[in-house]
Amino acid sequence: MRGTVYDLATTRPFAEKTIADFGLTDRIGFLEGDYVREAVPGTYDVAWLSHILHGESPEDCRNIVGKTVAALEPGGLIMVHEFILDNTLDSPLFPALFSLNMLLGTDSGQAYSEAQIAEMLADAGVKGIERLPFRGPNDSGIITGIVKG
């Protein structure tokens, strides 16, 4: 089984170094592309969107999620890892402060709530959406779902 990191060309050196540091160069490749402007090439069983949605507008996030779901096999798993806000959009503290930073420091980025991410996934045809009982550093979380077959 071989995995692929799909990201901007500028991230390639960091990604390849990280892959090599974990001894996974024979199992994980790198494919340059722009997930905002281009389709996700290939077909996959699992997609892991880790800390990319917060840099994008709600419209671009829906596009990214839609393109990702389109690249998944029926029954494929999508996982979104982000600093997830409560549905009130004002907590936990780190995601709320991070969202403020993104709102000030990017054209249209922000942190998203669990409900907002779940809605993006559902609109793209994902079912069985759930937040995993995982709480990472700085209150990061993971929301998963399965692509309808």
Image (spheres, rainbow, N blue to C red):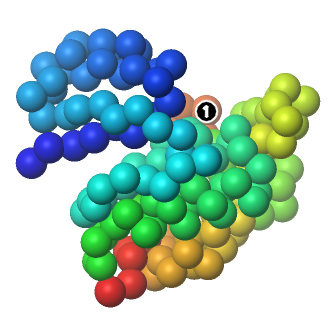
Q: Quadrant of the C terminus?
A: bottom left
> Identity of the amino acid at label 1?
Asn
Q: Residue at x 30, y 13 (%)?
A: 17
Horizontally, is 2 left or right of 142 in the view?
Answer: left
Q: Is residue 90 left or right of residue 39?
A: right
Q: Is residue 105 left or right of residue 95?
A: right
* Residue at x 30% of width, y 19% of height: 16
- How crowded pointer 1 is (Cα within 10 Å; few <14, some 14-19, many 20+) is rated as some
Q: Is residue 84 above or below residue 27?
A: below
Residue 39 appears in the rendering: yes
Q: Give the residue at the far front of this rendering.
A: 38
- Above or below residue 2? Residue 87 is below
Name the image quarter holding residue 18: top left
Task: Examine the rendering and report whether any part of residue 143 can be seen.
Answer: no
| Residue sitting at the far right | 104
Residue at the image point whose x is 58% and y is 56% from the top = 64
Residue designated by label 1: 138
Considering the numbered disc 1 on the image, is that residue within a helix, a strand or a loop?
helix
Q: Position of residue 14 (x, y in %)?
A: 40, 15
Q: Position of residue 5 (x, y in %)?
A: 34, 37
Quarter of the rendering containing residue 133: bottom left
Q: Which quadrant of the view contains residue 83?
A: top right
Looking at this view, is 37 or 16 the one in front? 37
